């Protein structure tokens, strides 16, 4: 019997396998309940009672459960095998992560990246879902699937980003707006970074469900991005308007912002929409760590530019720091 098999066998005696089964069952119940009870409800009360939010909150708590040192390496190795974790850039050995939360949100070795102002870098280890020019209220989510931009950014289902509103939002003449979406899988490095120097002007936190955001789910389920919990950062970069939206998902215990240590998501909400204006603006530097998902999720970017040369393809795996576009 291998060391891994021995460890897993011993884990059953300690109850870890039992909790794993409970965890999986709870997730199944969450998705079922999401369809049956909350899928078509978008008010604050529905979100407060959302089973996906409750299960995700409990998942975050479970991920903080202490793991005995002898079990850490085989357990994280098994997880890494299933989810294709890159161990080469880790700063710590597997035995040093006391729980899954520490493992999920691990720091990694520093990376070199192109500091040229006209080159935008990938904000997180991720897969490219889509990239496109934003001409109206329905940019591409994944192939043959679109999302409602106005609803997504404002939390108001009836708000439409008309071409006139989009044009008025731009900071320069003769430019266009573009969207790019990066999906973080469970095995990815879970921290996100600044794609460029960024003047942060405001932030919105929109309470919502925490439905799955994997491709197979969003391809067949409407309004996932528009109704999931999300944090939107609005500001400018060297070439005009930029927004960075962090989208929550099932089992994402919370999303964090390094510049605001008190900010928390997936808590019992008293308001559906919370807006904060920063005066003076906050200057965030390219490549700096912005925060973390406490499990995987999605980063949606929208930016203004006159010309764009894309360096990515749909479905491509990227690492944070890779150049995804050259702009002017």
Image (cartoon, rainbow, N blue to C red):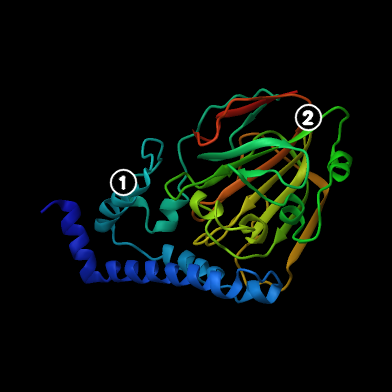
118, above or below 293, in the image: above
Decide: few, some or many residues near mark 1? Use Cα within 10 Å; few <14, some 14-19, many ≥20.
few
Q: Nearer the viewer, residue 88 or 242?
A: 242
Residue 73, given in percent of the width and then of the height, sits at: 28, 51
Q: Nearer the viewer, residue 101 or 250?
A: 250
8, above or below 192, in the image: below
Q: Quadrant of residue 8?
A: bottom left
Does residue 146 appear left or right of residue 153 in this picture?
A: left
121, above or below 38, in the image: above
* Quarter of the figure that contains the C terminus: top right
> What residue is shown with label 2?
239
Q: Tell me how many marks there are.
A: 2
> What residue is shown with label 1?
81
Q: Residue furthest front?
A: 144
SS type, badge 2:
loop
Does residue 216 appear left or right of residue 158 in this picture?
A: left
160, above or below 308, in the image: below
SS type, badge 1:
helix
């Amino acid at each position: 019997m291998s060391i891994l098999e021995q460890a897993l066998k011993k884990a059953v005696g300690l109850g870890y396998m039992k909790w794993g089964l409970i965890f999986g069952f709870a997730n199944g119940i969450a998705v079922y309940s999401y369809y049956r009870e909350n899928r078509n409800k978008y008010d604050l009360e529905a979100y407060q009672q959302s089973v996906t939010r409750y299960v995700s909150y409990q998942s975050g708590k479970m991920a903080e459960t202490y793991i005995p040192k002898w079990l850490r390496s085989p357990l994280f190795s098994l997880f890494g095998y299933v989810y294709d974790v890159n161990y080469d850039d880790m700063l710590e050995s597997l035995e040093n992560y006391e729980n899954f939360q520490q493992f999920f949100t691990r720091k990694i070795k520093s990376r070199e990246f192109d500091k040229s102002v006209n080159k935008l870098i990938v904000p997180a280890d991720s897969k490219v879902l889509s990239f496109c020019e934003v001409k109206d209220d329905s940019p591409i989510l994944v192939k043959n699937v679109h999302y409602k931009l106005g609803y997504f950014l404002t939390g108001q289902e009836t708000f439409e980003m008309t071409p006139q509103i989009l044009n008025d939002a731009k900071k320069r003449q003769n430019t266009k707006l573009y969207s790019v979406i990066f999906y973080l899988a469970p095995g990815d490095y879970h921290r996100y970074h600044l794609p460029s120097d960024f003047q942060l002007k405001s932030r919105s936190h929109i309470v919502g469900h925490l439905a799955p955001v994997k491709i197979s789910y969003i391809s067949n389920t409407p309004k996932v991005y528009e109704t999931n919990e999300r944090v939107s950062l609005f500001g400018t970069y060297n070439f005009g308007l930029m927004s960075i939206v962090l989208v929550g998902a099932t089992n994402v215990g919370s999303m964090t912002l390094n510049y605001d240590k008190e900010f928390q998501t997936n808590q019992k909400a008293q308001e559906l929409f919370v807006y904060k204006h920063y005066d003076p603006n906050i200057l965030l530097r390219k490549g700096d760590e912005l925060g973390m998902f406490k499990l995987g999720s999605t980063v949606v970017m929208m930016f203004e530019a006159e010309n764009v040369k894309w360096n990515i393809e749909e479905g491509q795996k990227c690492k944070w720091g890779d150049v995804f576009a050259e702009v002017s």
